[in-house]
Amino acid sequence: MAMAEKHYFDPEDLKKFGQIGEWQKPMADKFFAWYGEVFKEGALTEREKALIALAVAHTVQCPYCIDAYTTTCLEKGADEEQMMEAVHVAAAIRAGSSLVFATQMMNHAKRITM
Amino acid sequence: MSIHPRTQTLARRQSPLSDTFYQLKVLNGYAVTDAKVPPFSETIRRAGYVDGILRPTRIEIFQVNVGKLCNQTCAHCHVDAGPDRKQENMTKETFDLCLAVLQRYDIPTVDITGGAPEMNPHFRWFVEQCRALGKHVMDRCNLTIITSHERYRDLPQFFAKHHVEVISSLPHYSARRTDGQRGEGVFEASIEALRMLNDVGYGHPDSQLKINLVYNPTGAFLPGNQEALEREFKTQLQRKYGIVFNRLYAITNMPISRFLEYLLESNQYESYMQTLLNAFNPAAVAGVMCRNTLSVSWDGYLYDCDFNQMLDLKVNASCVHIRDFDLSALEQRAIVLNQHCYGCTAGAGSSCGGQVV
């Protein structure tokens, strides 16, 4: 049985990303052109964009993206400290976005309690 | 601070990879792995190089590898240099043969490398002789040699006195990345050496004394954009340590010697070769260093580059030794190509002077 049939994620599948164009070429072409443009150096450096991508990859918990942007971050000159700080930023926003709803809990609790 | 090496030389460990023929078998899929990458000459033939032949332009850089002796044993070293390599070091007689060639021909630049070239007992004399001939002299200095022993601490003054351009490996501005490749304690010693070089005038924007750093990836990935890396290195080294330098050269790791061993042991050889092949850039071929460089080994043999030297692939010419040096024969030679050449043509290309496109 092929690996992909036993597991949802196979690292080899990342190499096939470009094949999504086989079933819808115009949209895939637009996506990959836009994607390439996004990661070019602009107001942000390629290294900064790679660190943002790494953080987002952890938030959306995409194993392909985590592998890909770990490599890209290293290629662009980031080190372990910068990469871990980027993941902490992602984690802090995830945690904070839960905790900030505690204000709603507090509001509601205060409304219905004496 | 003392340096704790990451490994021992392949030679000392009597690794099969210390045999260059065995390395070439691996690179061509006849040992360890049967992974086949298209022959490099075939790839450049498709890119427009007739018959897959690459020819030199003219020899502008005379690169002398004065020996394999080094105070470091870096995990990726393509020379398999180390403290135990005491036999392979250039003698005065061979230096004299090099000087005779340099005196006779208009080759403007002498690029001295090793090992740690400063450990060769004739190093300073050779630099002085080259300068007396009016040559531009570059020294590929590992930095830590400067702080390794009292007798080397005046190297910054020596370099400054003779206007030597210093080229130094510093794979990262973080200690963890640098020490992971070059040995524990290397980063701290390198920073101290860079301060000493800055103190005698190296690296300041208005100074004629140039210190250029060499970045190479600290693992099985390609270097990023050279200019972006240079900006980041300048910002971080200035901010954290107050260090200045001139240029950063981004160099790709060649899949030979100890880096080849690392690739094989970490099961990354095939994916790394595929990465190099996928990143093959026809535009990089024209600028590879073997076209304007001649490489001389410690024992006087001639090679197209330092990597061919380490694979014992001598020049394809009627003269293969410095004592028989014939410029016109050498400038008409076909450059010896093999599968490691993909390392110099990936992405923006790679040479001893960094990216080539």
Image (cartoon, helix red, strand yellow):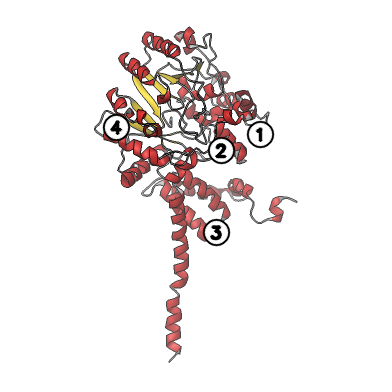
Q: Which mark is residue B35?
A: 1
**Residue A21 appears in the figure:** no
Count of all numbered marks drawn on residues in the image: 4
Q: Chain of mark 3?
A: A
Find the distance from the CA under tag 4 to the CA under tag 2: 37 Å
Question: Mark 3 highlights which residue?
Answer: A61
Measured from the top left, where is residue A110 in percent x and y?
42, 86
Question: Mark 2 highlights which residue?
Answer: B275
Q: Earlier in the sequence, mark 1 or mark 2?
A: 1
Q: Chain of mark 4?
A: B
Question: Mark 4 highlights which residue?
Answer: B202
Contact (Cβ within 8 Å) of mark 2 with mark 3: no
Residue, x 53% and y 48% (percent of image)? A68
Give the image quarter of residue B152: top left
State the residue in front, B67 or B228. B67
> What kind of residue is marked 3?
Gln
Q: Is residue B236 above or below residue B86?
A: below
